Amino acid sequence: SQELEQSPQSLIVQEGKNLTINCTSSKTLYGLYWYKQKYGEGLIFLMMLQKGGEEKSHEKITAKLDEKKQQSSLHITASQPSHAGIYLCGADIRNTDKLIFGTGTRLQVFP
Amino acid sequence: DSGVTQTPKHLITATGQRVTLRCSPRSGDLSVYWYQQSLDQGLQFLIQYYNGEERAKGNILERFSAQQFPDLHSELNLSSLELGDSALYFCASSPRLFTGELFFGEGSRLTVL
């Protein structure tokens, strides 16, 4: 089984709607990182969360880290077609300098 | 443009063959990571190098090997290829030993027929 599970696996939303993607770890989180991948392209770093309760925002994307639940959420406000892609969470869950990634969430935004 | 260059972008080969994928990290980055992305397995960590030395190993098969050269570029060698090795192979780099902020290349898409 995957050590970093994301939900939902895929999401189709209408432009302007809000949405949330979750990432849950089966092990202790030592930092949580969110990336976005456009189809068939490389990953682009979005943001990093290192402390429990930490929340960061970039434009219309907000990410939070709940260390107790070993979980992070990514929230997009007023989604746009440019938000479409695959969102992946990454973490060093064993504190071994290995960044592993979650199962990914495929987001489609239609006009 | 992340500054990480991967070649070739696409590669089609036959089972049993051997291929080499090349990665040039961003200027000044000492760490290089290799990942494999397939539909059924997702994005899997293979191996990491830092300044020429292997630092971390993931789910890398024995048929696969990698190295980082003195000029910091890296190569991933895949041998005795099987159909299941068809995937997108990503290289990423970062300036320090470990940071969760990696800069990814565009990937090398390998198709094994």
Image (spheres, coloured by chain):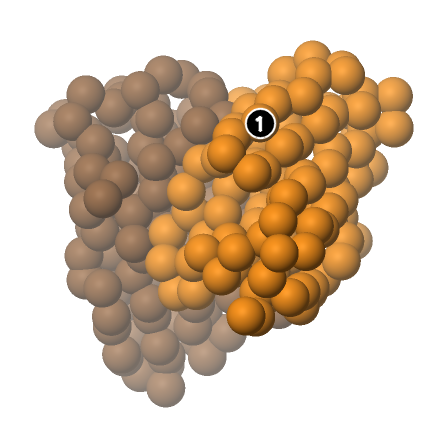
Chain colours: A orange, B brown
Q: Position of residue A96 (x, y in %)?
A: 60, 23
Q: Position of residue A46 (x, y in %)?
A: 49, 35
Type of the residue with mark 1: Ser
Is B66 positioned to the left or the right of B102 in the image?
left
Indicate the chain on which mark 1 is placed.
Answer: A
**As displayed, is residue A8 above or below residue A34?**
below
Q: Quadrant of the N terminus of chain B?
A: top left
Left or right: where B38 falls relative to A22: left
Q: Secondary structure at mark 1?
A: strand
Q: Residue B63: give x, y in percent of width and height.
A: 42, 58
Left or right position of B51 against A83: left
Q: Residue at x 34, y 26 (%)?
A: B94
- Residue at position x 74%, y 33% from top? A72
- The foreground one among A44 and B34 is A44
Image coordinates of residue A106 in percent, x first then y, are 61, 62
- Residue at (27%, 79%) from the top-left corner? B13
Residue at the image position 40 percent from the left and 32 percent from the top: B102
Nearest the eye: B38 or A80: A80
Q: Residues within 10 Å of mark 1 (few under 14, many from 20)?
A: some
Report which residue position mark 1 lands on.
Answer: A57
Residue at the bottom extreme of this rendering? B113
